[in-house]
Image: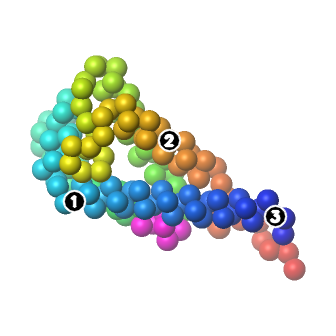
Amino acid sequence: MMHGDTGRRWSVRILRILLGAVFAWSAVAKLQDLSGFHAALLAYELPIPDRGLRLITLFVPYLEGILGLALIADFWPETVRPAVWGLCSLFVVILLLSAARGLDIHCGCFGGRGAPLAVALGRAGLLCVLAFWLVLQPSRLHASPKKN
């Protein structure tokens, strides 16, 4: 086995655990303050009726928690990794649209008031890039067989 391959595998393992922990932490923070998360969603002034935002308020934390735990456990990586990247991409798009509209909001990403928009956008962008890199890495399902 080549040293570079081992380093890449460890990089993938560390990144998926860290990314999974971020998603799980975000889920727990939102679940502890669903009203605050709902208020943060309202501040984005999305063209979604309040009833839809309430469903999103209930759904997103559980989705983040499931995806986070699945990343940590390396469960269905060929499905979970693109789902995490897709969710990160959606967050980036929503934050970019909010910035373009000149909204002075805090993200609500980790519960409570959250980070200012510029900080949230930088963080979401970084997570999106890392999640995309993870998507590009082979999963254990697609890993090359060991040679004896």
Say whether residue 19 is visible: yes
Which residue sits at x=59%, y=52%? 134
Q: Is residue 122 above or below residue 8?
A: above
Q: Is residue 145 above or below residue 148?
A: above
What amino acid is at disc 1? Leu
Q: Is residue 67 magenta?
A: no
Magenta extent: 69-74
Which residue sits at x=48%, y=56%? 19
Q: Position of residue 23 (x, y in %)?
A: 39, 57
Q: Which residue does the numbered mark 1 point to in the structure image?
A: 31
Name the magenta segment's main secondary structure.
Answer: helix
Q: Is residue 73 magenta?
A: yes
What amino acid is at disc 2? Leu
- Residues at marks 3 and 2 touching, judged by CB atoms closer than 8 Å: no
Q: Which residue does the numbered mark 3 point to in the structure image?
A: 3
Q: Position of residue 135 (x, y in %)?
A: 58, 51
What amino acid is at disc 3? His
Determine the CA span between mark 3 and mark 1: 42 Å
Q: Which picture quadrant has residue 11?
A: bottom right
Sequence-earlier tag: 3 or 1 = 3
Q: Position of residue 79 (x, y in %)?
A: 51, 58
Q: Is residue 125 above or below residue 67?
A: above
